Image (tube, rainbow, N blue to C red):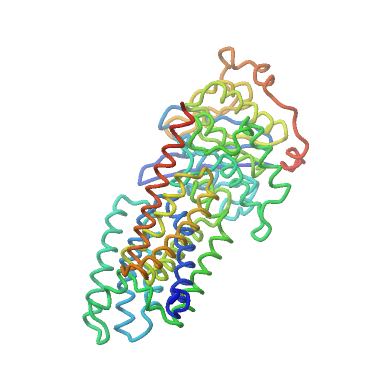
Amino acid sequence: MSVFALSHGTVALGGRTILSDVSVTVERGEFVAVLGANGSGKTTLVRTLVGLVPLAAGSLTVFDQPVQRFRERWRLGYVPQRLAVGGGVPATVGEVVASGRTPRVRRWRGLTREDKHAVMHALEDVGMLDRVRDPVATLSGGQQQRVLIARALAGEPEVLVLDEPTAGVDVDSQELLAGALSHLSHAGGSVVLVAHELGPLAALIQRAVVLEHGRVRSDGPPPDPEGPHAAEGHVHQHAHPADPPRAKGFGLP
Amino acid sequence: MSILELDFMQRALVAAVLVGLAAPAIGTFLVQRRLSLMGDGIGHIALTGVALGFLLGTAPVATAVVVASLGAIAIELVRERGAASGDVALALLFYGGIAGGVLLIGLSDGGSNATLVSYLFGSLSSVSRGDLVVIVLLSVAVLAVVGLFARELFAVGLDEEVARVAGLRVRFLNLLVAVAAAVTVTVAMRVVGLLLVSALMVVPVATAQQLTRSFRSTLLTAAGLGAAASVGGLVLAFYVDVAPGAATVVLALGGFLVAALLGAGRRVVPSR
């Protein structure tokens, strides 16, 4: 049972080949990092996996269904690389996170108690519950990134795909992120993330796919963790106890 | 004689309230998407629709709704492509709209440029019973779209790609906003005129933002301010004898100034 299975995938954008003959499989419950230099195709790879970029050649299945026919999109959570959240109108942290729940909300019913619980839980997971009524525009970059991750978590996805979640994020936020992702992983969820530097996430990673010039250079155990933040115990001392309703949301086998 | 005893004023007031509510409600989603000027563009295109109505001898509002909606869909499709030339494509569409309107009205028997002026600047006091029915139905339809789809429209406005990955029908929702904006423009053209339509969609939203923290309260406050400005403009026009559309927009802008000062004051005081 795989979450993503990309086989001999080729992606071309604007006439330029970005990925060539890339085969990557992510199994359920795996925590995979996509590493590589700038321009190696990391972002394009994860955008391809979530269905935002079409394949020029090769095949992709998502939860064992061909990507074109995959309809259970609430099972995917996606956190794009982003510097600022919002738009031309103010929005609170609570509103942005609740928007991640939208695909699960019935039009005529509004937010149920279950929906509200999922939103609150996601906020708690990234340590932003006390900021629920604050406008997102007033938050720091790291806090905004946590809000974006909470938005994805609010949909209770089975896999979370993150593009550079730690870029430009302060150390405290990075550790909170690591805690939230570790909960998700312990509850049986899968994580695929693009990263430049792993920081506190290093201890969580089970496998690293390294890209170079649009090809897979290596796929296997992660590079040795470095530095004091990478130690296993450090991440876990920030962890809250796993919550049963969240675990249920992941549809454990 | 009281303002409310006049038939035409009663109709004008109903139209003003509904348009005043609907324009900023859909406008909030345009501002969120940073498309504040979209209403202007649609207004230009609607002028061709009005003139086409005169040329064909049908109701100008009906042809304006159709032409403005098609124009709004075209704008949205150009925007979706995200092409660098999108900006120029929009400009072409806008100028085509105005030129087409003036050209077509010249070809028609019934209308002249003077006819177009009443659509450019509004003619709220000439709203007939039939006009009112159309205005009520269309404004209620726009408010219903906002009410039913607000959650999805908000999510798409925040981040289209995240919404697409989550399975929301992004293109449908964007076209829905575009068509709702086009319908609002054509309904509001009787109230404030095509040239000032966008002001009623955008200015109350800008005003509300000075005082609010959430998207929801911005939308609700903007709708209230819009209704207040259009009713206020109508009453002012009745007593002072000025054009109601212009009076509405000037009132709305006055509200913005006051709110901006209040907002600035509020931001300065707590930091001391």
Reply above or below: A249 against A236: below
Q: Nearer the viewer, residue B224 or B120?
A: B224
- Identity of the residue furthest to the front in this view: B1
Q: Quadrant of residue B65?
A: bottom left
Residue under the image location 36 percent in, 79 percent down:
B60
The N terminus of chain B: image quadrant = bottom left
Q: Quadrant of residue B109?
A: bottom left
Q: Is residue B237 left or right of residue B29?
A: left
Residue under the image location 46 percent in, 46 percent down:
B209
Q: Nearer the viewer, residue B27 or A232?
A: B27
Residue under the image location 65 percent in, 46 percent down:
A75
Residue B135: where, in percent of width, then height? Answer: 46, 74
Q: Quadrant of residue B39?
A: bottom left
Can residue A187 be seen in the rendering of this structure? yes
Residue B49: where, in percent of width, then height? Answer: 33, 74
Residue B171: where, in percent of width, then height? Answer: 48, 58
Can residue B164 be seen in the rendering of this structure? no
Reply above or below: A140 against B245: above
Reply above or below: B73 against B64: above
Reply above or below: B246 against B270: below
Q: Is residue A227 left or right of residue A114?
A: left
Residue B218: where, in percent of width, then height? Answer: 50, 50
